[in-house]
Image: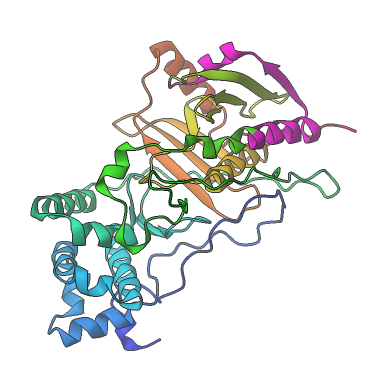
Amino acid sequence: MGSAEELFEGKPTGLPAPMARGTSFYREESDPVPVVRHVAGYDQFVEFCVGRGVQAEELAADAGRLFWFLRTIGSEIANDSALKAAAAVFAGNTLARLRPDAVWTTYEGGAPTVGNWEKQFEVVRLLDGLRSGDYTAVQGLVAMVTDWAQEEPDDSPAMQPRPVAQPAGLPLYVRPALPEATYYSEDGTPIPYGRRWGDGGPDSESYSVDSHPERFAGLHLVARALIAHLTVVYDVEVHEDPALAAELLREARDVLEAVKVTPRSTGAASLTFVLTGYPGLMVHAGVLHDFSFPVCGCDACDETVQTAADRLEMLVLAVAAGGYAERYPVGRRRWSEYALTAFDGSGSESGKSEPVPAAADRLREAEIQLRGVAGGWNPWPLRQS
């Protein structure tokens, strides 16, 4: 590692390992997941800056100046994949430097991001946006990042739920085979979902287009397989009734079926699966959080059934293993917060926001209930043979 890569805090490392999902394989967690704030691989961009007479140290210390510089050279680096990758790493490290709670994150099948619980930046897409955006758009981005950097960090201690390893010999969850199909654009060209945009980023019009939602039909198979797995492994009660969709804090449209799986244990979080005709589903976990699969089916987001299934499996298996925590209210703004640790300890995620509008008595009940599980929801009890 050369001296060119000494512009940021700490020793540069590789990207954090992405979470690998699809089967439930439990292992003991020997070490906590490392926090990555300084990623290696940007020396080529530093050398490029030197050739342009620009001080990389100054760009690393001023995100606004870096963004305007990246906009100026955007077309040039777009034609050099290695240079663009180095510039993306440099930009990500610069963002991580802005806040003490900002870290690098990777997910299987997804692009690396940098940020904290409140805001995440996909660095490659950031470069594309700087290149294609007009003056007003870039100015707005700089202002947004500046505001984010100046916000007071939340001093609440982070929730770190720790899942319990499943004993050996119990049935493992295995994702069912998902239907495969080729989808075509209006001109008859096959659409490579998950990698359709390349380096250029999504077309601006694609954000309002939701073509081929049928590609997510396999999520219903995954949901049913997960429910079957939970009933085999854990001591639970299962209720099926479309009216259970009322468990959600957000409205679900075109409800096909709803299934609530409740562990027979005090302090363990229930899961309510609501399958919709989109096709997709929403899952209500615990008391105050709904999770949508897919998150967004629009053409720009380019989500696939595989990546949506990854997230669904992570949520469900983590909740059952005791890797899920909720907190409300948090701070002066009375936010609702969740934290999730993958069932095998391979990764984690968290989120915090204003709670979805709900009846005041439901929020009060949630606040009281969450006091009893301040360290996180308990693992589900295993079914006795």
Can I make out residue 296 in this image? Answer: no
Left or right: where 249 falls relative to 256? left
Q: Nearer the viewer, residue 377 or 175?
A: 175
Q: Quadrant of the N terminus?
A: bottom left
- Vertical comparison of 128 with 8: above or below: above
Residue at the far right in the pictured view: 385
Is residue 223 covered in magenta?
yes
Q: Quadrant of the C terminus?
A: top right
Residue drawn at (30%, 37%), measured in percent from left and top?
A: 208
Residue drawn at (57%, 11%), measured in percent from left and top?
A: 243
Is residue 142 covered in magenta?
no
Residue drawn at (83%, 50%), measured in percent from left and top?
A: 168
Residue 182 in the image, given as x and y percentages of width and height: 54, 48
Residue 49 in the image, given as x and y percentages of width and height: 19, 81
Q: Main secondary structure of the magenta part?
A: helix
Can I make out residue 179 in this image? Answer: yes
What are the residue bounds of the magenta stretch?
A: 221-250
Q: Nearer the viewer, residue 268 or 308?
A: 308
- Count numbered badges in the picture: 0
Q: Nearer the viewer, residue 269 or 250?
A: 250
Q: Nearer the viewer, residue 298 or 114?
A: 298
Q: Quadrant of residue 39?
A: bottom left
Residue 185 in the image, given as x and y percentages of width and height: 41, 46
Residue drawn at (53%, 24%), measured in percent from left and top?
A: 277
Q: Quadrant of residue 222?
A: top right
Residue 206 in the image, given as x and y percentages of width and height: 31, 44
Q: How is the image coloured?
A: rainbow
Residue at the far left in the pictured view: 135
